[in-house]
Amino acid sequence: MMLPIVAIIGRPNVGKSALVNRLSGEQDAIVYDEPGITRDRTYRPAFWQDREFQIVDTGGLVFDDDTEFLPFIREQAQAALAEAVAAIFVVDGQMGLTAGDEEIAAWLRTQNVPTVLAVNKCESEKQGLSQAAEFWNLGLGEPYPLSAIHGNGTAELLNDLIQYLPTMDEIEDTEEIKVAIIGRPNVGKSSLLNALTGENRSIVSPVSGTTRDAIDMVIERNGKAYRLIDTAGIRRKKNVDYGAEFFGINRAFKAIKRADVVLFVIDVLDGVTEQDLKLAGRIIEEGRAAVIIANKWDAVEKDSHTIYEYQKMLDDRLFFMEWAERLFVSAMTGKRVDNILDLVDNAAEGHKKRVSTAVINEVIEEAVKWHSPPTTRQGKQGRIYYGTQVTSKPPTIALFVNDPKRLDNNYRRYMEKQFRQQLGFKGTPLKLLWRGKRLREGENMGGTRATKV
């Protein structure tokens, strides 16, 4: 569903991210007492009355300074405004009207986007009207005093905003595939995001930690909607100080949990590092589908053996993710980037796939015919009575056996391989639950005839 977009605009530290959290009802945007915390544009769902929309948080605007990331932040704010149906201009009621506010207001008056003026940090309702009064001078209509922290005054603001938002009947309903872009710092996540969207939605810089928050955006391709979530680079825990980076990494872990598919980005120049292995483990632990993206392929000197050597490196280091499809790309040049969403489709399909109990038992019966369960030293053989899929995302199959201890790891891997070969499950972890259950031949359990196979 492509929801209308409302851009949040304002100077640094006026409470834009706090207002995003208030309007979205989530604590996803990083709120921290340090200018420049928000740099890219971050998207959050919100609603008011019968209208749903997306809020886009942007970095603090400063027009008379070109140091550090400030020119990039201005570009991001301009891009957010270009796709918005309305803007909320946030000012600081405690500080009062500043020259920076006047500059932003003059810029907003040149844009073809309706603007609602929010005077934040008016914690006292009695003093709020007097604090907001001087902002009439900005020429943007009525200033609404509010407190993003406490919530007072936001209803009046939204009642004004709602006139610019389409009704749900006017919005086409499209299912989204949520895709989180995960990796260490400087592996090219933001460059990959920009290549996928065809525009500079994320700031790309050689400075480690440029992306601090999880950045949501929705793109469409072939009638399908994809919610792309760029995240902060995840460093080793001992190297992370409490503050903006700490919060950003927590958001990245949350992004893995809420994603359907993870694009696991690896720098081919560095190879698969120990931190990459830990991130891979986190993806599996959360049960997420994944596509391994080996980025910076343009920087590799190639010969006839190069692709084989790098493929073997991935196979050896990430053997426990052999189910994930791999793709060598260059986010910088765009090489093979167009193929990524095809692999995302495959992984998402495998992740939500459900198979009937009858089909699962046909696979079990065939697998056992070719390779019987092992026999213990005491002469006791393992037996699989039947199996059934109990859930999806990830696909989880319960196998009812006489004694789980008699099915060793080799045989468990063999059964997983059979399920994958016969039923697909591309790009997703597959969980097998081995349940000890002594059943007499012909005993009925859960509507399924239990037979020894």
Image (tube, rainbow, N blue to C red):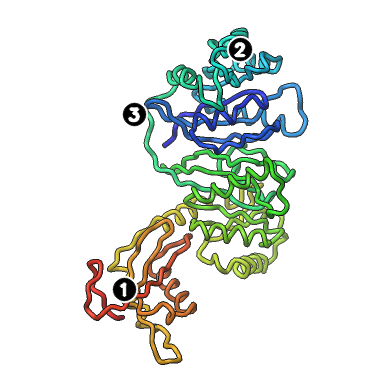
Q: CA distance from mark 3 to mark 1?
A: 47 Å
Comparing 378 with 139, the one in front is 378
If you read the primary sequence from the N terminus, does the residue marked by circle 3 or circle 1 appear first?
3
Q: Residues within 10 Å of mark 1 (few under 14, many from 20)?
A: many
Q: Measuring 54% from the left and 32% from the top, which residue is drawn there? A: 21
If you read the primary sequence from the N terminus, does the residue marked by circle 2 or circle 3 appear first?
2
Q: Measuring 52% from the left and 62% from the top, which residue is drawn there? A: 324
284 to 58, vertically: above or below:
below
**Disc number for residue 150:** none
Q: Which residue is mark 1?
A: 386
> Can the viewer see residue 339 in this picture?
no
Q: CA distance from mark 2 to mark 3?
A: 39 Å
Asked which secondary structure carries label 1, the reply is: strand
Number of numbered discs: 3
Q: Residues within 10 Å of mark 2 (few under 14, many from 20)?
A: many
Q: CA distance from mark 1 to mark 2?
A: 71 Å
Q: Which residue is mark 2?
A: 131
Spot occupied by residue 212 in the image (x, y as percentages of width and height): 65, 41
If you read the primary sequence from the N terminus, does the residue marked by circle 1 or circle 2 appear first?
2
Quadrant location of residue 34? top right
Q: Which residue is mark 3?
A: 169
Comparing 293 with 208, the one in front is 208
Q: Nearer the viewer, mark 1 or mark 2?
A: 2
